[in-house]
Amino acid sequence: MVKATSTVQVRSKRPAHGVRGVIDEITIRDLGVIAEAVLPLGAGFTAVTGETGAGKTMVVQALGLLTGERAVAGQVRVGSAQSWVEGRWRVPLQSAVAERVRDAGGDIDEVPGGGATGGDETGGSGGARGAGGGVLGELILSRSVSGEGRSRAIVGGRSAPVGVLSELGERLVVVHGQSDQLRLRSSTAQREALDRFAGPEFAQIFGEFSEAYRTWRELQTELDTLVSQRDERIREAEALRVAVGEIEVLAPQQGEDAALAERANRLTNLEDLRVAAAAAREAVSSEELDGRADVVSLIDGALRQLERVQSHDAALEPIVESLASASFLVAEISSQLSSYLAELDTDGGAELDDVQERRAELSVLARKYGPSLDDVIEYFATAGPRLLELDNDSDRIEELSDSLAERAGIVDALAADLTAARSEAAARLSALVSTELAALAMGGSQLLVDVSAGEELTAYGHDTVQFLLAAHEGAEARPLGRGASGGELSRIMLAIEVVLAASDPVPTFVFDEVDAGVGGASAIEIGRRLARLAEDAQVIVVTHLAQVAAFATNHLSVVKDSDGSVTQSSVQQLHGESRVAEMARLLSGLPDSESGLAHARELLELARGERV
């Protein structure tokens, strides 16, 4: 187990806010106690305050709906047919989010005057983030929930599955509410967070390991297939050997079956063909001297008659020419019929037997390896190479075994490098987060990052990573979420997020009641750390502590109307004295208490001085 051994302050030097995209505004209608409200947010640290039951947490619920969380009918305001929320984001036009929106058929409008940014928001699967940037665009997401619990999502002006909102939400927003401490609860997410924190040198080692592991797995899969299917492949090889032998003996040719069918038909009807051809030749040009008129004689007679008188009428000339052509054509037909009769076999019986036998043999091949003769020929063309491959199984198994042994050594060595790098990063992460916890009213608490190298090798190495919390010195370290209250868990997550923000920036963090159970100096430290986190990301906090709200760069107050509802006019963006009065109310419960007002001004001055 790796324990914290040092105290190091973390302050990111990365540019903030517009780099990865922020929520500019959220509009809420008929959600819980909120009849209608527009919340101006924007970059930096936004604090949302208000009386108990005024609907502050509806902000968190609205964001949950916009990021694909499950909708329930109970969220719809009493007396309304449906709830509706809309969020307006500014995101780089060249980013993973923008690409996913376009894939879903939605649009992102370029923001007038939107300049180039220095990075991309959350990138690929598992929370990986990449650099990028570009001109900013406005992305609009909306969601409606009916009184029956049915919901509809709109992404960039186009209807889309709620799952698309979930995908976008993973890249845009991390919510830490009393029941939403999910981001770093799983061992997988904790390993991914540690890997990103470990930095570029670890990423290079991991890339080399991943390539070696992929090759090793491909070789192992091929070997497992060859071994597990050995008997089946032997049977396949024997069947192919028989087939290749049978086909080679007969050596069928392309289109041979059709040619044989045509030849068999001719031989079967040989006598009929001979009789018909002879009769036709006699009719065209008879060789018998029996006085019968044939076509040649008739045409020749007609031609002689017209030639005798054609000098008397020029109109006969074309007719004479046509008769002359006909005479030539008929003579040609007579010659062809004579040739055809000469070519007809006098005895086709023996050949017919041979043809029918060949057809029967080819038919057997077609039934076994067809269904057509062309299929048989194609099967033969592929059977040879496949048989060669199967016959070489033993050689391939030996070759794969040697390659695997070599690759296994490489993969194990790289996996050991991963373990060493993770362990070193775990010590740093443990120390930094434990330092943050000490300032968040959790003195004596330690985050312990346990890196355990097991026997099983996965695509991520041998390691299992687990974040453990020792609640006080000497206490048993337990997994996150066990033994910690909701407010404590929010503070733990805040400490982790502040440390990770420098290496693993997320566009927007939302904290609900992160300050539960603390006050005084500890609350001021929470405010400081939220302000620090806001240097790298947009931060939205629902709070009841003035010490936290003082560090916000944007302060929203939610107030119930006299009828218990929250309307458009009930959400106010506080400035100047109105903010001082709200801070005094948070401190003393009295917005016009002189001591409360003085303390509020003192807090605001303190926070303002630290931001300068």
Image (cartoon, rainbow, N blue to C red):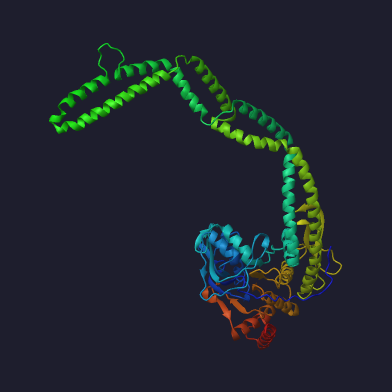
Give the quarter of the image for residue 321. Answer: top left
Q: In the shown orientation, is residue 539 left or right of residue 347?
A: right
**Residue occupying the point 73% across, 78% down:** 525
- Estimate the x, y position of residue 13 in percent, counting from the top left: 70, 76
- Estimate the x, y position of residue 16 in percent, counting from the top left: 64, 75
Front residue of 164/518: it is: 164
Res. 28 visible in picture: no
State which quarter of the image contains the N terminus: bottom right
Q: Is residue 11 above or below residue 212?
A: below
Front residue of 157/482: it is: 157
- Estimate the x, y position of residue 497 in percent, counting from the top left: 71, 69
Res. 605 visible in picture: yes
- The residue sitting at the right extreme is 474
**Residue occupying the point 31% across, 16% down:** 282
Front residue of 453/316: it is: 316
Q: In the shown orientation, is residue 197 left or right of residue 540?
A: right
**Residue occupying the point 27% across, 11% down:** 290
